[in-house]
Image (spheres, grey):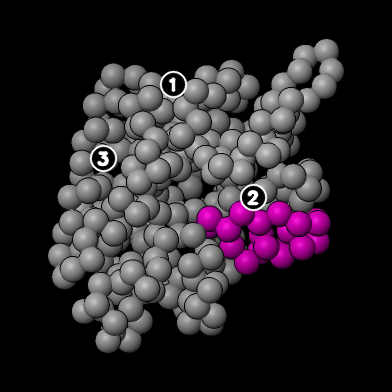
């Protein structure tokens, strides 16, 4: 999926919602546990309840890896059930030496057929560029995350004539590796005070924004500060949608939660786009 197609979906659905499929077997509704594949059955019903309200799904790969071979089966079945006009993100946070990154890229783009994968930039360009060689696929680079430990490195000040935070150096350097048609960035919603600094460096790129909802980030603030001419935002919500209920009505409640977010996004698209 290219940028124009993604923007088309945003306009069509009046939404820039990404639903995180962080499916924990220990949190599944009890009535699903006797299913042949409880994780897939949960994901299937979430997708069917929300696919007209979101433009992206983001399985966090750790939730599937932790289950061993069955987890990969559930993940593949989930991907096959996602409609083809919805952008898929492998939240894998990979990043290794070049030949290993090449194999990770094959895994997520050629074997599993994700549209994009999250990548850690701190081993430098040779660990990222193998992901950028796959035509029609995207790299979503970690830039400014919302976890407490982000202070350890991302907020360090670099030296020189123009001192900057390390995350700003990451943005400036990595933006030379690919265009805004192939490279996105993770920017946490709880760091909204820095979004203007991000946009000054990468005005045209899409930002994947976790941290809205359960983590307390403001959708209005992120939308006002981060939206560009093609929206430029994919705002993720995981727990607030998929775990809106733990009962038999979990899919219905997930839809209600997603609809609430979509309706708010519709207002911001009209106001800020």
157 with respect to 257 (left or right): right
Name the side, left or right, on which 97 lies relative to 181: right
The mark tally for this picture is 3
Residue at 37% in and 73% down: 26
Is label 1 in a helix, a strand or a loop?
helix
Element at label 3 = helix
Mark 3 residue crowding within 10 angstroms, few (<14) / some (14–19) / many (20+): many
Vertically, is 181 above or below 268? below
Q: Are marks 2 and 3 in contact (CB under 8 Å)?
A: no
Choose the circle earlier in sequence order: 1 or 3: 1
Please say whether residue 6 is visible from this viewpoint.
no
- Where is mark 2, residue-wise? 119
- In the image, the segment drawn in magenta is 90-108
* Quadrant position of residue 24: bottom left
- Mark before the other along the chain sequence, 2 or 1: 2
Reading the image, the residue beneath label 1 is: 225
Residue displayed at 61% across by 44% down = 149
């Amino acid at each position: 999926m290219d940028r124009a197609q993604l923007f088309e979906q945003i306009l069509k659905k009046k939404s820039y919602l990404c639903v995180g499929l962080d499916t924990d077997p220990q949190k599944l509704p009890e009535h699903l546990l006797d299913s042949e594949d409880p994780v897939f059955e949960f994901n299937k019903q979430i997708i069917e309840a929300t696919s007209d309200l979101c433009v992206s799904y983001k399985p966090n790969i750790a939730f599937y890896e932790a289950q061993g071979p069955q987890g990969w089966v559930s993940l593949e079945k989930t991907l096959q059930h996602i409609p083809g006009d919805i952008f898929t993100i492998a939240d894998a946070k990979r990043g290794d030496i070049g030949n290993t990154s090449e194999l990770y890229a094959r895994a997520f783009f050629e074997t599993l057929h994700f549209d994009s994968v999250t990548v850690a930039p701190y081993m430098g360009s040779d660990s990222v560029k193998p992901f950028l060689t796959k035509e029609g696929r995207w790299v979503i680079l970690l830039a400014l995350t919302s976890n407490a430990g982000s202070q350890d490195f991302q907020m360090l000040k670099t030296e020189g004539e123009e001192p900057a935070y390390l995350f700003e150096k990451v943005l400036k350097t990595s933006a030379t590796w690919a265009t805004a048609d192939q490279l996105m960035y993770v920017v946490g919603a709880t760091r909204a005070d820095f979004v203007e600094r991000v946009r000054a460096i990468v005005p045209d790129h899409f930002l994947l924004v976790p941290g809205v909802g359960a983590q307390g980030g403001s959708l209005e603030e992120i939308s006002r500060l981060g939206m560009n001419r093609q929206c430029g935002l994919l705002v993720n919500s995981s727990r607030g949608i998929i775990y809106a209920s733990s009962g038999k009505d979990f899919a219905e409640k997930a839809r209600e939660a997603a609809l609430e977010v979509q309706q708010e996004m519709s207002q911001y698209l009209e106001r800020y786009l």
